[in-house]
Amino acid sequence: MTPPSDRIRNIAVGLIVREGRALVEIYPATDRHGVFARAIGGGIEFGESASDAVRREFEEELDIELAEVRQLAVTENIFEAGWARGHEVVHVFAVRSPAFDALPWDAELSVLDAQTTVRWVELDALRADDPPFYPSGMLDLVERLDASAR
């Protein structure tokens, strides 16, 4: 995760929910923060649509092509991360790929362009803040996706 600055950052993230679990990126603990989960995605480049950005991010980070991208919401994430304040406009998508449908519950994927991993986390654990799940508002959206899948 890029340290926050005094600018508003536009990001695109994808949510994958299956049988009461969400696929999330796990950031390891550092001297500045504990372990936390984040929706998979990243920055939108100048001239790029949010849906193209989320597709590109999944290809860059996991080498996975998305079969479906459906916009769910646009939210704001205003936060302090120990060393600075941050402000993100978050374009949130429900995403699908056959690769995720076949991914076992105990799988842990290495993110190709970071020192993080991706894994399934039960929604009950995310509700209990174990680990905390960012950006703000993602838990409500994964719960809605989970409820609509039942």
Image (cartoon, rainbow, N blue to C red):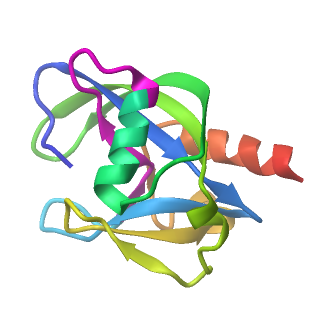
Residue with the most extreme top position = 47
Residue name at image x 58 percent, y 24 percent = 73
Q: Position of residue 118 (x, y in %)?
A: 42, 67
Residue with the most extreme right position = 150
Q: Is residue 58 left or right of residue 101?
A: left
Residue name at image x 65 percent, y 47 percent = 142
Nearest the eye: 49 or 33: 49
Is 13 situated above or below 30?
A: above
Q: Position of residue 56 (x, y in %)?
A: 35, 41
Q: Position of residue 101 (x, y in %)?
A: 67, 66
Q: Which residues are magenta?
A: 36-51
Q: Is residue 88 left or right of residue 13?
A: left
Residue with the most extreme bottom position = 106
Q: Is residue 3 left or right of residue 108?
A: left
- The total of numbered circles placed on residues is 0
Residue name at image x 36 percent, y 51 percent = 59
Is residue 128 shown in magenta?
A: no
Residue name at image x 28 percent, y 67 percent = 116
Is 13 situated above or below 24?
A: above
Q: Position of residue 71 (x, y in %)?
A: 59, 27
Nearest the eye: 65 or 21: 65
Q: Is residue 114 left or right of residue 143?
A: left
Is 148 situated above or below 90?
A: below
Nearest the eye: 59 or 10: 59
Nearest the eye: 63 or 37: 63
Quarter holding residue 63: bottom left
